[in-house]
Image (spheres, rainbow, N blue to C red):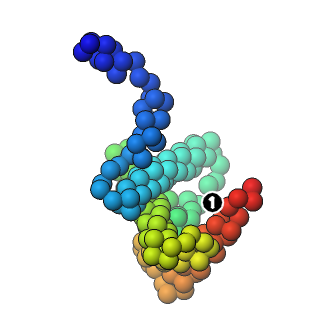
Amino acid sequence: MGSTAGNNLETRSLFDEIRSYNKHGGLFDLGHPLLNRVAESFVKAAGIGAAQAVSREAYFITLDSAGFDSSSGVVSDVTGTKKQRLPDLRGETNRKSLEAMVKNTGKESLQWGLAAGMYSGLTYGLREARGSHDWKNSAVAGAITGAALALTSDDASHEQIVQCAITGAAISAAANMLTGIF
């Protein structure tokens, strides 16, 4: 009987494991739905942010190695600020290049995770407090999340914080109103 259970566990595929997470309510059980939702959103978005940062750097490295000008290395990060691509990269060693990429990837992962976890937690909390889930909850959550995301940039100005708050509110309210149309 014990060996049958052991064999069954060994033959489960990754797809079976992922499907079992959805049946049990997600990846985390932290004792409260709000905590579960924030943690799960943070982890998923942080993974997406890391993949995005690494793929962007791989793209620019490919352009540089092919001899194309990658617009002098200035790119926009999640907060919309212009920054030098891998500012710690001086071309001295591969170790410094790797360290710079890991640092950049970690920062962007944190930004993406912060945005997703905060937005998810705010929409959940507002729905519980107001008793309904509508565009107003989405707009408030988007505005607060946008402002918080703007504060993660190196040189956050008042105008940038307000702009990110308005953009976050507009995008999340529009997404909420368009849900169900498509």
Horizontal side, residue 83 vs residue 178: left or right: left
Please name the amino acid that badge 1 sits on. Ser
Front residue of 136/40: it is 136
Residue sitting at the far right: 181
Q: At which x and y percent is residue 182?
A: 75, 55
Front residue of 149/31: it is 31
Q: At which x and y percent is residue 145?
A: 48, 72
Which residue is pictured at 54% across the width and 46% down the height? 55
Which residue is pictured at 43% across the width and 62% down the height? 117
Horizontal side, residue 146 vs residue 30: left or right: right
Q: Is residue 139 visible?
A: no
Q: Is residue 90 above or below residue 66?
A: below
Q: Secondary structure at mark 1?
A: helix
Which residue is pictured at 46% across the width and 42% down the height? 22
Residue under pointer 1? 71
Residue sitting at the far left: 2
